[in-house]
Amino acid sequence: MSAPAFSLCVYCGSRPGTDPAYARVAAETGDWIGRHGGRLVYGGGRNGLMGIVADATLAAGGQVLGIIPQALVEREWAHEACTELVVVDTMHERKRLMADNADAFVALPGGIGTFEELFEVWAWRQLGYHDKPIGLVNTAGYYDTLTAFLHQSVSAGFMSDAQMSLVRTEADVGQLLPALVQDSGLAPRFRTELI
């Protein structure tokens, strides 16, 4: 198996959500990763948006690295079709391996776990623990109120504009994903003609 052109860590819901647009953006994300010779790094589940993005990546010819704690194998129905499925002991180990194996991070719609993962890699970046790009896909305005609150935090003096700029927010994955891969410094390995 050839080395992937890039590895994109995707955080998203283990539920599909109520708006069909959420499932569509998960499928678009996986399809884009696969068509561009990439590897999806994600939480290893087969339910909800997690399963959709993994299935779409595989269907488009991409590789999938799933990382899931043993305690969640049954609860999230581990995706056995992953190119590689790693079962770990703890959530901390899961998140560390996901981060270590990624060139960039992107959050799709999701719940508490998605929020926590997004904020953790964002905090790590502003503290200098990594310099990998981070993106937020604002599908159907899902993250409008979150981004409004974050700007309120800047206005209140608890965050800076520089910290806000560390996360690129777009509604269109076709614009966001190429930008993240380019920002990761992988342009020479990336098949730019397919952007």
Image (tube, grey):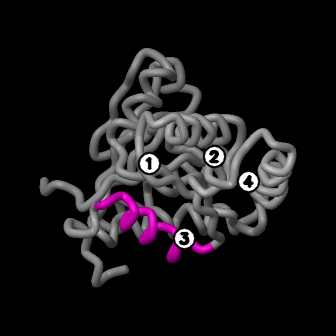
- N-terminal label among 1 and 4: 1
Q: Residues within 10 Å of mark 1 (few under 14, many from 20)?
A: many
Q: In which quadrant of the rendered view does residue 184 lie?
A: bottom left
Residue occupying the point 69% across, 63% down: 138
Q: Which residue is mark 2?
A: 13
Q: Residues within 10 Å of mark 4 (few under 14, many from 20)?
A: some
Q: Which residue is mark 1?
A: 9
Residue occupying the point 51% across, 53% down: 134
- Left or right, residue 67 beside residue 84: right
Query: Looking at the picture, which amino acid does disc 3 mark?
Result: Val
Disc 1 and disc 4: Cα gap in Å? 20 Å
Disc 3 and disc 2: Cα gap in Å? 17 Å
Q: Which residue is mark 3?
A: 173
* Quadrant assignment for the C terminus: bottom left
Q: Are marks 2 and 4 in contact (CB under 8 Å)?
A: yes
Residue closest to the eye, 112 or 52? 112
Residue 190: horizontal and vertical position, in percent? 26, 69
Query: Looking at the picture, which amino acid does disc 2 mark?
Result: Gly
Label the magenta part by its dominant secondary structure.
helix
